[in-house]
Amino acid sequence: MCLYVNPLFIRPLELGTEHVIDGIKVTMLEANHCPGAALIHFCLPNGQRYLHTGDFRASKLMHAYPLLINQRVKALYLDTTYCNPKYRFPSKEDVMSFVVRITQNSLRKQPKTLVIVGAYSIGKECVYLAISKALGVKIYTNTTRRRILQSFGWPELSGNLCSQGNETPLHVLPMSSLRFEILEHYLKPYMNQYTAVLAFRPTGWTYSETIGNCLDLIKPTSRGIVTIYGMERLAYPVYDYWHKGKGLLLTLDVADTSACSYYVLVGGSQQ
């Protein structure tokens, strides 16, 4: 939809359904990340199994996947951005609870606050949906983003979208728009309704080793009527998770890159 790829070249694969492609069994598994993100499980004709990930949120739920229970995987490709022991992110649930708590506290102090969540073309939906549910308000986005969100087939989300910014105090903007001067300008058409802006920038690029997964250490930055929280990426720490008895990984002698490492899963069972 955003990349304008000809639909003739797209072959959707349902999550959890086995597909045979050139003799190889391919199954897409829920990655607990943004909509459409998947772990890809391959089973070769000789029985060897491979697992490839993009960015994903490691969780206990993944130990319930039949293809991963007590199964030996020959190779695991962790093509994920934050597979590094220095990244220790809080859980998605903890981040959402923190965001909702900050929002509610801010609105109690200043009821005329416009709440803004930064997001890429997809992703971060769970953040603004959590705020929407907690406050009982709709979510405003521009037409392009709304069209993308409505294509997800996610009734709870699409049913909470609205097309007019003055209908709700919860707006979603591009991540690049979360700058003081831009938010000050954005507020001007709504000054008869709101007198302050509370913005959340939920991205791992704001990660701080000092804060780690301690959300209460996060301090906002403020200028005038605008307050911005730089939130941690909504993910479990992949490296930390796999090294706490959840799986045993052996690093191979392959050149490392900033976003992709090559591992072998030595044992398929939980420890």
Image (cartoon, rainbow, N blue to C red):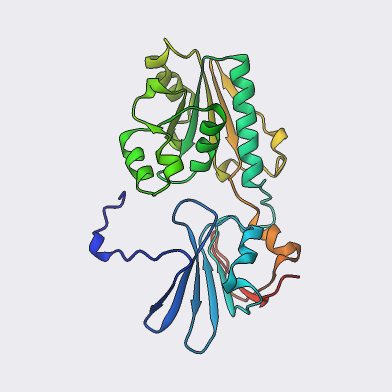
> For this view, does 180 lie left or right of residue 162?
right
Relative to residue 92, is residue 24 drawn left or right? left
Q: Depth check: 41 or 221 in front?
A: 41
* Residue drawn at 47 percent across, 57 percent down: 37
Vertically, is 106 above or below 128? above
Q: Is residue 212 left or right of residue 169?
A: right
Residue 220, visible in the rendered structure: no
In the displayed structure, would residue 73 be above or below residue 246?
below
Q: Is residue 121 above or below residue 143?
A: below
Image point (32%, 66%), residue name: 11
Dividing the picture into quadrants, the one containing residue 18 is: bottom left
Q: Is residue 66 visible?
A: yes
**x, y (%) of residue 201?**
53, 35
Q: Kindly indicate the quadrant of the structure image that contains residue 62.
A: bottom right
Residue at 40% across, 22% down: 167
Q: Residue furthest bottom?
A: 46
In percent of width and height, residue 260 lies at 54, 64
Percent x, y for residue 155? Answer: 42, 44
